[in-house]
Structure formats: C-alpha cells, structure tokens
Amino acid sequence: QQPVQSPQAVILREGEDAVINCSSSKALYSVHWYRQKHGEAPIFLMILLKGGEQKGHDKISASFNEKKQQSSLYLTASQLSYSGTYFCGTRGNTPLVFGKGTRLSVIA
Amino acid sequence: DAMVIQNPRYQVTQFGKPVTLSCSQTLNHNVMYWYQQKSSQAPKLLFHYYDKDFNNEADTPDNFQSRRPNTSFCFLDIRSPGLGDAAMYLCATSRDTTTASETQYFGPGTRLLVL
C-alpha cells in the first residue's frame, strides 16, 4: 500500500527549513528516503528502522515514529542543491513502495 | 566502483515496435527490479527477479516482459509499445527483498520515447 506524503510541494528560500512527512496505514518496518533531481535516478538518503530512531546526514535528518506509522524528513538551512523531489519508500517483506513524492524548490 | 548501469540512457521507438532495455550490475546482488516512472509520478514497480525467480506485480501489463540470463544482467522487453508507455524506466538492485534495512540501489534510468 502506497505511503502518503505531505506536502505535495514546497518552495523555500535558501537558509529556510522544511519538513516532509510520510505516513502509512499499514505497519511500517522501515522507511527509506530518496531524493530525485529532474531526469535523474533516485539517490538514496537514509533508512530508518523500527524503534523510533532518528538519523542525520549533514543538515538533513529524519525521524521514524513506529507507533504513529510515520516518518518525517527535516531539511535545515536549505541550500540550492536540496531542490528535487523527495520520495519516501516503505517495505516490510516486499520491495519498496514509494509515496507520490514532495517537490522541493529552493530559491536564492 | 560497484554500480548499476542502464543502456541506453535514451531510447526512441515507434508505436508497436518491440524495444529492449538493458540493466547490468556489479554489486552481485540477488535481486533486480524494474520500475516505471512517468512524469511527476512515483516510481512504480513492474516486476523483480530474486535470482532466477520472476515476480510480476499484479497490475503490470502483459506487454511488459523481463529476462535475467545471469546474475549481472536483466532486460526489460516491451512487446508493442504504446504512447502511454513513454516513461523513465529505472532498474534497481538489492541483496534481498525481505530485510527491512536493505537498500535498493538505482541505475540512472532509460528514458523511453514512443513516436
């Protein structure tokens, strides 16, 4: 079942912060975050596993609330290079199923 | 560097003319996937191979077939492309399908245009 992402799109100025949410009606075993730039393949950002963990990579971090079956991706002090479409993917004992994506545009 | 390679990067075909897209990997992963991604949409899984075992998604049209002659290569065959099949086709690999922490690695994609 496809996870639900919000918002669908967001526009930021450089240096601003953003939060992208991903939720599922089914039990989540893990949440995978990818970023895709136009015409390119999705690039893996991070995985979050059961246990309510948080992860960070540079100024991009994420949390996973197993009880609420949702994950949030946090982009801090956004840079122009952060622009792209962010997908969350969920998997249990099946291949990844992606949400519809959140289009992030960072402007100068 | 270990990687997932797709050829060609761009493919133009005519309506109804069979076309084959290629994917190879140097990661020695057991699983290879094919996703279809249309403009502004999420990647949609078509099918995957776990070793030689083929797993088709229920809603994948019969027009799409796949072959995996060995561990390294996987092909996507579109028997009679329609205009609606124009999309980016992404190949991905992973070690297995059941481990929640297992990452899927994507190739650069092949953009298919149907005239």
Image: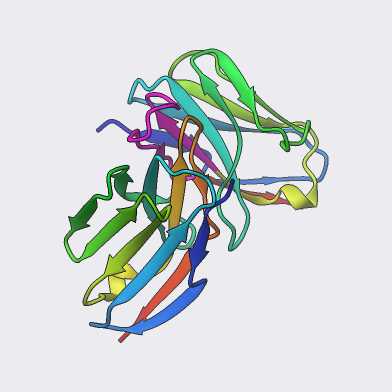
Which residue is more in the foreground, A9 or B24? A9
Q: Residue at x 25, y 75 (%)?
A: A79
Identify the magenta region.
Answer: B90-109
Q: Residue at x 75, y 33 (%)?
A: B18
Residue B14 location, quadrant? top right
Q: Residue furthest right?
A: B16
Task: Identify the main secondary structure in magenta.
Answer: loop
Residue A30 appears left or right of A17: right
A73 is higher (above) or lower (below) than B86? below
Q: Position of residue B39 (x, y in %)?
A: 61, 60
The way the protein has been coloured in the rendering is rainbow
Q: Position of residue B68 (x, y in %)?
A: 55, 18
Which residue is more in the foreground, B63 or B81? B63
Q: Residue furthest front?
A: A67
Q: In which quadrant will I find the N terminus of chain B? A: top left
Q: Residue at x 32, y 53 (%)?
A: A64
A38 is higher (above) or lower (below) than B53? below
| Residue B103 colored in magenta in the image | yes
Q: Residue at x 36, y 49 (%)?
A: A66
Q: Position of residue B43 (x, y in %)?
A: 55, 49
Q: Position of residue A34 (x, y in %)?
A: 38, 53
| Residue A96 colored in magenta in the image | no
Which residue is more in the foreground, A92 or B1? A92
Residue A68 location, quadrant? bottom left
B114 is higher (above) or lower (below) than B46? below
Number of marks drawn: 0
